[in-house]
Image (spheres, rainbow, N blue to C red):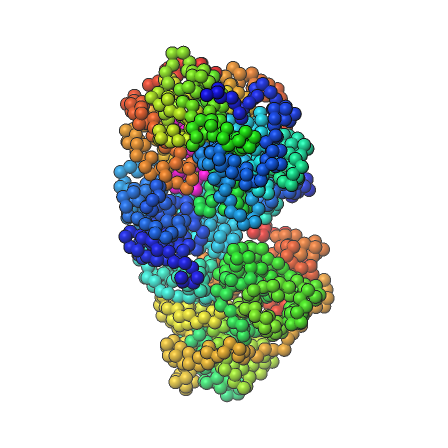
Amino acid sequence: MTNGRRMVRLTIDGTSLEVPEGTLLVEAAKSIGVHIPVYCYHPKMDPAGLCRICLVEIEKMPKLQIACNTQVAEGMVVHTASSRVAEGRRGVLEFLLLNHPLDCPICDKGGECDLQDFTLTYGPGASRLTEPKLHKPKAVDLGPTIVLDEERCILCRRCTRFDNEITHERRLIVVERGHRSLIGTADGKPYTSYFSGNTTEICPVGALTSKAYRFRSRPWDLSHADSVCTQCSVGCNYRIDSRFGRIMRTYTRENPAVDDGWICDRGRYTFNYLYEPSRLRQPLIAVDGELKAATFDEAIALTAEKLGRAAQARRVGIIGGGRLSDEEAFALQLLARDVLGSDNIDYRASAQKYASPPRYEARLADIDDASLILIFGAVTPEQAPIADLRIRRAVARRHARLLFVGPFVPPAFVPSRHVPYAPGEIAPLMRALADVVHHGREEQGEGFVAEIAQALAQAEKIIAIHNGRDPQAVEALDALLDRLAQYDHPVGVLVVGAAGNARGAEAAGCVPNLGPGYAPLGRTGMTTARMLDAAARGEIDALFIAGANPALTFPDGALVRRALERVEFLAVSEQVMTETAAYADVVFAAASFAEKSGHVTNLEGRQQPFHQAVEPPVQVATDAQILAALAHALGKPWVISAEPAVLFSQLEKMQRPARTRSSRDPLPRPCVDDPVPVPDPASWPDGLTVIPIPHLYAGGGAAAHDPGLAPMRPQPFAVFHPQDAQQRGVADGTRVRLRGPGGEIEVQARTGDHVPPGSVLVLADMPEAPVNKLTNASGYGVACVDAATVTASQELSA
Amino acid sequence: MAPFEPVLTRGLGRLDLTDLSVYEAQGGFGALRKALRDMTPEAVVNEVSASNLRGRGGAGFPTGRKWSFLPNDGRPRYLVCNCDEAEPGTFKDHMLLEQTPFQIIEGLVISAYAIRAERAFMYIRGEFLEGYRIFRRALETARERGYVGPRIAGSDFSLDIVVHRGAGAYICGEETAMLESIEGKRGEPRLKPPFPANAGLYGMPTVVNNVETLCCVPHIVERGAQWFSSIGPPKCPGPKIISVSGHVRKPGNYEVPMGIPAGQLIEEYAGGLEPGRRLKAIQPGGGSSAAIFEEDLDTGLDFDSLAAKGTMLGSGGFVVMDDRTCLVRAALTLVRFFEHESCGQCTPCREGGQWVARMVGRLEAGEGSNADLAILRTLNRTLTGTNLCPLGDSIMPFLSSVLRRFPEEFETHVTQAGCPLAAEQAVAAGAGA
Amino acid sequence: MSPERRRKAEELAARYPRRQSALIPFLQYCQEQDGFVTRQAIRDGAEMCGLTEAEVESIASFYTLLFRQSVGKHLIQVCRTLSCMLRGAGELQEHIRRRLGVRNGETTPDGLFTYEEVECLAACDRAPCLQHNLMFHYNVTPDEFDRLLETWRASRPAVSLPAE
Ligand SMILES: Cc1cc2nc3c(=O)[nH]c(=O)nc-3n(C[C@H](O)[C@H](O)[C@H](O)COP(=O)(O)O)c2cc1C
Ligand code: SF4
Ligand code: FES
């Protein structure tokens, strides 16, 4: 027995083997290196038995059987290479090739196509394939990312099953029947799944190809580098395929514990910005208010001088780390603490306050067997898409309950329960829950408390997911989990990071009160808010911002703008011109993740290595190189190495205690600012509470500049409750101006029942319409519709 | 031996059996009362098992055995009556539906009782609108009289029958496709295992039985397994309705003892061939069956005897073709049928079926080649037995059998670029009606 | 969904242990009203069963008696399979095509007649046979067809695809 499963002994092609009962023949064969061809079978999906290429001969069974849906049985004798099997496979291939266009020379899949490969190995001679081909639609535009060639399609249905069994979105379908069957969508609507790119990988032929990669390269011309996606905090493992030093595509590199073999389209397609004119290719220095090209040395010299001078006066601040590698985040805090002698360092450039749960750390895989998933703040389909697939599977396949607590109903593709709670009221709810759970009075409690408390009490395993924005709610959650853990409920927490490496930066010491490895310093520098405030008041002279764009992402936008305008010197390290870099005196052109090596730490605390795929442009440096050069110029070259390996060995030592601590010991927490109340909508004429909402394709950095993402990128929009919209004369699709105490933005209006009356959901992180003009430090804001600006718009909402 | 008396079709054509009182006057619903009053469900299953009743839907699976597969695990169970009849040449269920609906209801209720089904479903082919209306009316009447619904005939047994209309798809006659269709999905056969006995309708233990099979059940209950198994060959006994069509003088449904020789059916029941005509081929068991010929006329019409001849009794659709028939054209109508009705899930059926239809289409149009013939001769090896469900396995048998028996007819279509019988066929058209 | 449709949807759903089972009867009902399965019907069906529109479209497209385009007031479906073919279906079909001036699957320009050749209708002993608005006509000779055509022309059936 292994894992409690009985073992079964069988023979495959003369080799005797033992596998757990229930194992499919195709997997059993794989385990001893016997290859059985498959098209429709995919290990992540239920067997479908459609393509019939996996035929094998089983003794005592009159007909050939399919290996993909046959479970092993004691004493089974299987032949995978007999002449009957060969004939069966040849037959299936012959059928598949009948109407296949055989256009391998111009097909993107050429070289990694299972039809091509199996035809060579098992296929018929060409002799009988003289049948005139039936024609089907070619180059069908399936949506912003995918092109479908129906003639190449072998109807294995991996794509529709993926869309059904894996994403649960159920928009990709087979229409018609028999040989007229086609893959499609309802009424030809675009296929807009965030996971569409995966279908191009699982398609065993060249029927589904990605627009981004079409006709770009041939598989055998590609060099591969194992990397990790840093577009969000899940940290999916992928491979970067390049040709002549240019990235051609990215490809999954399955890590069952993290991504389960999938990546989302944001991760997959965000790389072409590197080749756009807007990519920063050399450092810039402001001359008379205008940024001009400069040499690296000039930029370093100027920045070192300004930072050094400000440091002497204890008037320096450093923001960033969440978009750097672990090594570079470590180096960034070295610059602050060991070079400049300041604890004014903070990675938190958005509303996120915490990236690591102090206790009850969960792994992504813990979602798989959770019986209750409680989410507040985080919008996982937008912010952690691949983690959301696990949530969908747990709910759809394992009957986990999914509870959202928060002001609006987030998108969900599986059954879920939304518990409406106003912004700012989550903490009291968590406290109330802790109280009733503690006293075993689950059925009591006000409003939804009883409902949630009962769900919690019944759950066998609970995973809480949040966005680390509300320290009080997080504190209260911890108390609640303590109570639940007392009753032997396994509990765990995942914090979805606003920046891809938020957790890595936190663990590397990019917070004012903690050093690397969460080591308490016993002293506290300034948080981002305090640095900005000080800068705005003229109390900080120089700011260095690395891989962060607070001008767009920090909730109190007015404060950022005042600070960046006022501060005497601002240096920014970036890959593209951002809203923040626009204020800079020096802009360093930084290398992207594809252009360097190192580690990143994902939301579950997993530190993963990534490897350089391509060289950066000549005048582009990695952040480690920039930081090392600054240390050098400031007279302390020994403090910061430009070598990731050196930095990593230093960091690793310092992180060891936190990693090996007992799970009972809470991690020290980053210091936070005093809470700021959510603005009262009554404080503003006709005011609505502004609730920023995330979107997978929003953002002001790479996403704003990548032509590959452009077709998917949303227009800035705001969603009103239909009642509020009607009262204000706002119709779906019109353009409206939202005005608040801090400023105004123009957006496209939409309406939806999922918006609470009296609130408006506004797309966050859009440079064209920064919602932080409306919000304060609480992360929420107040605004009214500027009646004069309501205009009919041509572009209706998608 | 006593002359065979019709059982399932008794009174049909003479009496209006859609009238409940007429049906009752004939002894209708007596078996139902008997079963509910005097027999346990197990006793009914045992009786049906002992009768050796084999499914009339095509596969000939022993009905009692099928019923006894249901696991005893407390889950709800369902019974589905298969009235999707669309097998080419078969029209017996259509007749039973329109002319003796109460017999079906009685069979359904007794069988549901036997397997302790919670609910029964009557799946009626979408094209049978009239039959659907007749059955709905009959069901209402039966419900009013307490034969369906709560506490049937004063017993503790309750049963609701849901009538479900198809929407145009032969494949929904295949039992797992039927379950998908009742669940409101595309009528695509399921991958087996699991089998319906374990995970059928809504994932629950389910039995699917043909209309005629269920119609046999009241008679077995009433007259006993022994009586039933004494009709015809003991291993597949009972009365059997054969649908006879094509080139006979009296096409129609004929109820005969299982095992009756093919020749006898033609001569004694169907009025023989038209004068001066000679038999060319018979398709004995629906469009899926291989042909038999002159030399096979003494073959008994039952599951085992026909299987021994390399064909099958199937659904009992018996199509007679005389010497006017162009077998290429006959084969074409059938392969085109399967091409049209393939669900398209699996490769051989979807692609192979379409290929065969194109090749036979070419031959029929006089545009075929010897290469086409050579390919057709081999395709039964890769197209039969490799599919997900039996539909794909049904494409080749008839074509292969006539191609083997009358190769010259196919070859002439190539050499003469058309049908040698065309002229005579035109004459035959007039005689068609 | 219109209130009347909703009522019908609920009535149909109540017949079954699970709602989705009522989808096809519901689409048949919509088709009887609209003459074919409209986009709205697809949407309504999706709403009724908690499916996506795509799923309903996929399901509807599987069945030949669910039409995604409007058909004539008179839907004439002639059997083309073996038994009917043996007894003159081919000649009947040719006759009808000529009479109506349409090919298989087409509707006459006046929108009155839709002609389809269909598979075995299980009436092989009375071949050739056809269905007119799902009502059977047996032993149809070309002359008989002409007679039927006259009576159809004179009548204006309310529905070509009755649901119940
Ligand atoms: C393609 C196909 C079509 C079928 N059509 C029918 C049918 O119309 N009526 C029927 O009773 N069985 C049909 N069957 C057989 C059913 O799958 C099933 O075996 C039968 O309903 C079981 O009932 P029985 O055991 O009473 O025969 C069909 C099978 C296949 C593979
Ligand atoms: S054999 Fe034909 S009908 Fe059966 S599952 Fe395969 S494609 Fe569908
Ligand atoms: S891989 Fe087994 S049938 Fe497709």
Is residue B59 shown above or below A250?
Answer: above
Is residue A97 among what the camera can see?
A: no
Place of residue B433 in the rendered image (x, y in percent of width and height, measured from the top left): 48, 16
Q: Nearer the viewer, residue A580 or B306?
A: B306
Q: Which residue is found at the position 33% from the left and 53% from the top?
A: A10
Is residue A780 shown above or below A791?
Answer: below
Is residue C22 shown above or below C122?
Answer: below
Which residue lies most toward the top here?
B275
Residue span colored magenta: B331-350
In the rendered structure, does residue A7 fall within the stretch colored magenta?
no
In the rendered structure, does residue B338 fall within the stretch colored magenta?
yes
How would you classify the magenta stretch by its main secondary structure? helix
Q: Which residue is found at the position 60% from the left and 61% from the top?
A: A403
Q: Nearer the viewer, residue A554 or A569?
A: A554
Place of residue B295 in the rendered image (x, y in percent of width and height, measured from the top left): 33, 21
Is residue A682 among what the camera can see?
A: yes
Place of residue C161 in the rendered image (x, y in percent of width and height, measured from the top left): 58, 31
In the image, A40: left or right of B381? right
Place of residue B133 in the rendered image (x, y in percent of width and height, measured from the top left): 61, 29
Q: Nearer the viewer, residue A717 or C118?
A: C118
